[in-house]
Amino acid sequence: DEAGHLVGRLFRRGRAISRFVQLWCDIDPHGRSAACQLAASERFLWPLPVAFVEPADLMQRILLWESQHHE
């Protein structure tokens, strides 16, 4: 039961991180605002990018940070 709960949490966090990367790297000028709102509501603690970054590079940076600062 506990393992299922943990897997569910990890799945939801992974989807939220994926959505953040999509929004941040979107061409839509409102995408970054939405990404910031998502980061705040999900309580993401990693630093936000300061410039354009390729989606794959951004995902790699976030996951590296997450692996080094896990709960």
Image (spheres, rainbow, N blue to C red):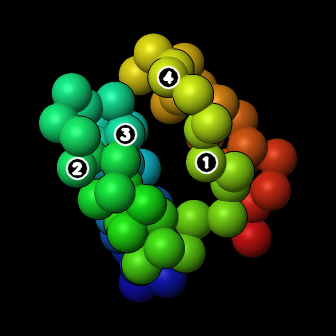
Task: Compare marks 4 and 2 and give the one earlier in the sequence.
Answer: 2
Which element carries disc 3, helix, strand or loop?
A: helix
Q: CA distance from mark 4 to mark 2?
A: 15 Å
Q: Specify the amino acid type for callout 2.
A: His
Q: Position of residue 61 (x, y in %)?
A: 65, 31
Dot 3: within a 10 Å radius of its alpha carbon, few (fewer than 14), some, or many (20 or more) residues?
many
Question: Which residue is label 3 attached to?
Answer: 24
Question: Which residue is label 1 attached to?
Answer: 48
The quarter of the image holding the N terminus is bottom left
Task: Say left or right for 6 vs 26.
Answer: right
Task: Say left or right for 4 vs 57.
Answer: left
Q: CA distance from mark 4 to mark 1?
A: 11 Å
Question: Which residue is label 4 attached to?
Answer: 52
Residue at figure coordinates x 50%, y 31% from the top left: 59
- Above or below, 23 relative to 14: above
Task: Compare marks 2 and 1 and give the one earlier in the sequence.
Answer: 2
Question: Which residue is label 2 attached to?
Answer: 30
- Above or below, 45 relative to 17: below
Task: Compare marks 3 and 4 and give the one earlier in the sequence.
Answer: 3
Q: Specify the amino acid type for callout 1.
A: Leu
Outermost front residue: 29
Q: CA distance from mark 3 to mark 4?
A: 9 Å
- Above or below, 40 relative to 17: below
Residue 61 visible somewhere in the drawing: yes
